[in-house]
Amino acid sequence: EAGVAQSPRYKIIEKRQSVAFWCNPISGHATLYWYQQILGQGPKLLIQFQNNGVVDDSQLPKDRFSAERLKGVDSTLKIQPAKLEDSAVYLCASRWTGSSYNEQFFGPGTRLTVL
Amino acid sequence: QQQVKQSPQSLIVQKGGIPIINCAYENTAFDYFPWYQQFPGKGPALLIAIRPDVSEKKEGRFTISFNKSAKQFSLHIMDSQPGDSATYFCAASGDSGYALNFGKGTSLLVTP
């Protein structure tokens, strides 16, 4: 079974530029999460989707971050404009809704550096 | 505010030793407690998880101990190996797909 795919793996941009990340969850996983992991810290939720609907975006900085999940499968996360403090690894995770456990499977992440 | 507090921040043990990582939580609504292992450049990988209806769970060399009254849980790695050197994160959540609340992580180094 293929895991969660993310691209690009690395991105370097200058502040005030825009950037987009892509995630393809495990096939059949209806729940998709985007987490932000700042160096030396644990991942922190940005947004959660159930199919193509948003479940929780309370911690998403909506003035600069946006996300969508078209057709309930792939998802994109966008930052516009980027700030220095957005430098982090952006992790996508997915979960099979039918699981009795809250098992979330993570992709390799996209490491963003904002100069 | 940090909902899950993890300690120590870093840990060095010799091969064969038993590193222990501790976590504490406040929210009594949490009922799912996983541990994730993360290698440099990789995403976190689920290692083992427990629910509060049991006090201990063992999978291979990894054991979770859970103390519901103290709102604490810990990870023990038996017969640790250099290949176990990684960052370990505890997490907690409510059930049914809620987002995971992670600790800050413990960097483990197992020396030969």
Image (cartoon, rainbow, N blue to C red):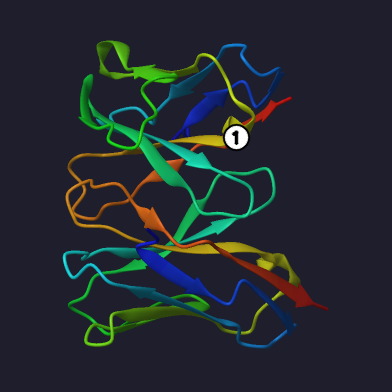
Number of marks in picture: 1
Return the residue nearer the eye: B50 or B1. B1
Look at 36% across and 31% down and name the residue there: A60
Look at 23% across and 83% down and name the residue there: B68
Residue B77: x %, y % from top left: 56, 79
Type of the residue with mark 1: Glu
Q: Quadrant of residue A56?
A: top left
Look at 60% across and 34% down and name the residue there: A85
Q: Quadrant of the N terminus of chain B?
A: bottom left
Return the residue nearer the eye: A27 or A44. A44
Residue A29 visible in the picture: no
Look at 65% across and 27% down and name the residue there: A9
Q: Which residue is mark 1?
A: A85
Q: Residues within 10 Å of mark 1 (few under 14, many from 20)?
A: few
Residue A53 visible in the picture: yes
Chain letter of disc 1? Answer: A
Residue B6: x %, y % from top left: 48, 71
Compared to residue A92, the image places residue B9 above or below, namely: below
Q: Describe residue B50's horizontal placement relative to residue A19 as left or right.
A: left
